[in-house]
Image: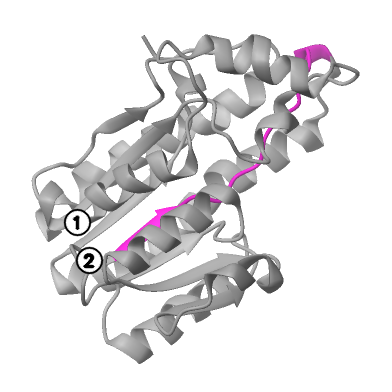
Amino acid sequence: MRMKGKTVIVTGAGGGMGQAISRKLLEEGATVAGIDLNEDSMAGLLHDRFTAFAADILDEEAVAGVFRDMHGKTGRIDGLVCAAGIAQAATPITDVSLDQWHRLMNINATSLFILSKEAAGYMKPAGTGSIVTIASVSAARPRPGLQSYIASKGAAESFTRGLAIELAEHGVRANTVHPGPADTGMLSQFTAAGADSDQTRKEIFESSVPLGRLIQPDDIAGGVVYLLSDDASMVTGTTLHIDGGRGL
């Protein structure tokens, strides 16, 4: 029960990774607020310590409302997990539109600014808190055709490091997780148009992991809970690779 009594906000809580993180936090005693565009996607997380919010993470007022509601209920905001994100189908840069670039950067990077700014407003006065950003091993080991996605995840990592040094004097920590190819619904979305997603999954993604299997959402959840917990009280500004060796 490492998270007993703590309040944590998780974005993308309706996705495979976000759900696993939320479940692990609940198991560890946390009160969890899940944010996703569709509240129904979080139906499997029914728990007396879980509250689902249908909100757009690019909407500053909606995000502020979630934090305000949870702080009103529990009197504290201890953690923020930015797990929401979108993929890029493998595409040559010459075929990527400016709108696609902006969408990837907005959801994967700009949302972190909105969420972290709101979180810092509660964590700084309390003198404690932990922010965890889910980025991607592709920022360290790029693959062809994912240039815009990689840029958004590289921005996420750099932004989080900047937060870490800025917020350290207030007792607030910020860290990044780089998942490797994860066994979630998002994985198939990286497949190039016209390619066989099952074949790509086996021949490209799974075979690229030295430990021999895709990363499971629970693998990510364990690392996130560690970074949020007091076990990591002196860990900030770091990037934790949970990638089965893919980043080597």
SS assignment at label 2: loop
Disc 2 to disc 1: CB gap under 8 Å: yes
Image coordinates of residue 97 in percent, x first then y, are 83, 28
Amino acid type shown at disc 2 = Met
Q: Nearer the viewer, residue 218 or 224?
A: 218
Query: Split into 4 quadrants, where in the image is the C terminus?
Result: top left
Res 159 → quadrant: top left
Q: Is residue 23 above or below residue 90?
A: below
SS assignment at label 1: loop
Mark 1 residue crowding within 10 angstroms, few (<14) / some (14–19) / many (20+): many
Q: Residue 229 carries which label?
A: 1
Q: In this view, does 36 lie to the left or right of 246?
A: right
Q: In this view, does 112 lie above or below 135?
A: below
Q: Is residue 159 above or below residue 113?
A: above
Q: What is the span of residues highlighted in magenta in the rendered image?
A: 79-94
Q: Residue 3 carries which label?
A: 2
Q: Which residue is drawn at 56% across and 26% down?
A: 151
Q: Residue at x 54, y 53 (%)?
A: 111
Q: Residue at x 8, y 45 (%)?
A: 234
Image coordinates of residue 90 in percent, x first then y, are 74, 19
Q: Is residue 68 above or below residue 180?
A: below
Res 67 → quadrant: bottom left
Q: Is residue 91 magenta?
A: yes
